[in-house]
Image (cartoon, grey):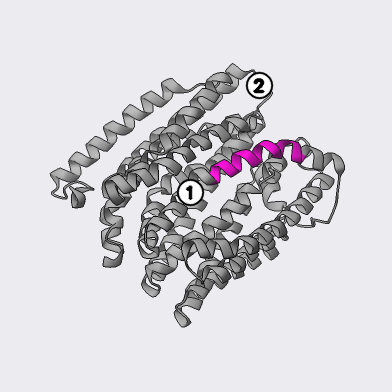
Amino acid sequence: MTSLKKLAYRGAVWTILGYGMSQVARFGGNLILTRLLVPEFFGLMAIVNTLRMGIELFSDIGISQSIVSSKRGDEPDFLDTAWTLQIIRGWIIWLFCLILAFPVASFYEEERLLWLIPIVGLSSVLDGFSSSSILTLMRNLDLRKSTLFELSVQVFTLVCLIGWTSFNPSIWALTFGLLLGAIYKMVGSHFLISGYRNRFAWDKDAVKEILSFGKWMFMSSALMFLSEQSDRLILGKLLSFSLLGVYTIAYTLASLPSQVIKQLSYKVIFPAISNQTELPRSILREKIISQRRLLLLGCAVVLAALVTVGDLLIGTLYDDRYAQAIWMMPILCGGIWFSLLFYTISPALLAIGKPLYLAQSNFARFVTIGFGLPVAYYKFGLIGAIVTIALSDLPLYFVNLYGLWRERLSCITQDIQTTIFYIAVLALFLYIRYFLGFGIPIQKII
């Protein structure tokens, strides 16, 4: 247990450092690209990437989760069978990109989507050929090598994007730059573990195990897409592509704390809990709660600081074309807290083999977005839509609480305590800001 704890701490440090460096690179690249390209291109790519992600999640059969949690996760036959399934899935994703390109282009009345969707969809085929070594490293909580590799993929992709855009500032620069990054990832992943190469294989028992676990992951992942990405699809129809691009910038910055926790949730918390599921439930719960408390207290301070100064950052770093992101960002950021509560505990339900609860949680958020967002937009305009998105993590969190209670992993007392702490820190930071003469973050719409 001591060894596992050390691996988990080391993995958490590498995940946070890696994500921090990743966001610095992403933010720097974003600033450059927003000066080279018009907001409309970011709106178009938001639609394309959301559609591709949706197809990927609707076809998720739990391959990566099976490798991490299965007792056979280190066996070559199991890994090679999983890799073969991954390749098949990559081609299926691209096929659906081809099929959906025309109806999506017709729905949004945008001919460029006819070509953008299939070309970007090719990256799923390339990802399918990426080595399973990335998941093996995560299973063993050896995250230094995988983190550095993922960072190198991102830097290479950004260099391609910026270089291509400098000579040809068009939507195609974004498209083919992403493909070059996917090629780099595919090739490089096969050299992560020395001496190991994936081969085509078909172990019937492995297939049965993966698909048995994957039937619930399919439902959970499909609903996760509807939960997390439907806002862009709906706003893409309600707003112009330019305004959608502005919203995408605001949401990306606002969700930074949530994305960090997602990385920790997937790469550290889930593998760590998966290695302890044989413990009595009461002991497992205490171990989770004790480690989670410090994480939430740190998140509360960071999130409160981002709500307080996020609008100032956008106003300083982006030009007037992105002015509306200034008031969107603090509203969206304020609602992230319940997402943090969710992602710091939901891996426990997945680790004990209960992904159905995650599916129910994501369904609750999807209903809120799917029905609440259009109604809020037509009644209260863009402000109503943004507030609805900010509050959409509440049903996600409450449904998850029910699953935790059923499985004797409840953490409601800790959540109440840390939420009070978050509100207190946020109030203090806002008071300091107001005292210094900077007003409040949403004063532009008051």
Query: Which residue lies under the disc numbered 2?
Result: 279
Q: Can you say whether 245 is above or below 209 in the image?
A: below
Front residue of this view, candidates 125 and 136: 125
The residue that appears at 55% across and 67% down in the rendered structure is 157
Give the magenta-colored segment's residue range: 210-225
Per the image, label 2 sits on a secondary structure element best described as loop
Q: Is residue 16 left or right of residue 222?
A: left
Q: Can you say whether 63 is above or below 167 in the image?
A: above
Q: Residues within 10 Å of mark 2 (few under 14, many from 20)?
A: few
Majority secondary structure of the magenta segment?
A: helix
Q: At label 1, which amino acid type do we have? A: Ser
Residue 62, image x, y percentages: 68, 43
Residue 218 forms part of the magenta stretch? yes
Front residue of this view, candidates 100 and 281: 100
Residue 397 forms part of the magenta stretch? no
Q: Can you say whether 375 is above or below 171 in the image?
A: above
Q: Is residue 169 left or right of residue 273?
A: left
Query: Which residue lies under the disc numbered 1?
Result: 230
Mark yes or no: residue 186 visible. yes
Q: Is residue 329 left or right of residue 112?
A: left
Image quadrant assignment for residue 9? top right
Per the image, label 1 sits on a secondary structure element best described as helix
